[in-house]
Image: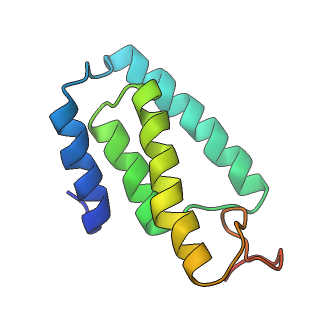
Amino acid sequence: MTAFPAVEAYRRELRRLGYRPMDDAELAAARHRFAEAHHSNAIEGVRPGDEQAAFWAMLFEERVPEDLQDRFAERFLEERILAPARERGLADPPPGRAATGRRRA
């Protein structure tokens, strides 16, 4: 469980799907790819927020296969990051940056 109700809603939805969870080797490989991507983003100054980090942790806890991770990650990005930015009048900024191109604090 996380402190983020939206993440728990995604978890409940995933559990209803009845997918085949990743085995230990698949999970280790997925975590490795994620760590590499996270490191690359950090070099560029892009860091996930707490809710985003909790979302990815939940995907690994639930052993969600990567094809399904991709579908849910796209939804999460649209629903929890991009749509709220648009509502605040921002363009679609890259994660971690304001519409002006400056890093968010």
How is the model colour-coded? rainbow
Q: Residue furthest right?
A: 101
Position in image of residue 69 (x %, y %): 43, 35
Position in image of residue 92 (x %, y %): 70, 66
Task: Please state, as top left, top right, bottom left or bottom right, where the C terminus lies in the image.
Answer: bottom right
User: Is 97 placed left or right of 60 in the picture?
Assistant: right
Query: Residue at (46%, 64%) from the top-left corner?
Result: 80
User: Is 92 placed left or right of 73 in the picture?
Assistant: right
Position in image of residue 16 (x %, y %): 16, 36
Q: Toward the viewer: 41 or 86?
A: 86
Looking at the image, residue 47 lies above or below residue 24: below
User: Is 50 placed left or right of 22 in the picture?
Assistant: right
Res 76 quadrant in image: bottom left
Looking at the image, residue 27 lies above or below residue 51: above
Looking at the image, residue 84 lies above or below residue 65: below
Query: Residue at (72%, 67%) from the top-left corner?
Result: 93
How many numbered markers are drawn?
A: 0
Q: Toward the viewer: 14 or 63?
A: 14
Query: Residue at (24%, 47%) from the top-left corner?
Result: 11
User: Is 32 placed left or right of 63 in the picture?
Assistant: right
Task: Please state, as top left, top right, bottom left or bottom right, where the N terminus lies in the image.
Answer: bottom left
Query: Residue at (59%, 84%) from the top-left corner?
Result: 88
Position in image of residue 54 (x %, y %): 38, 57
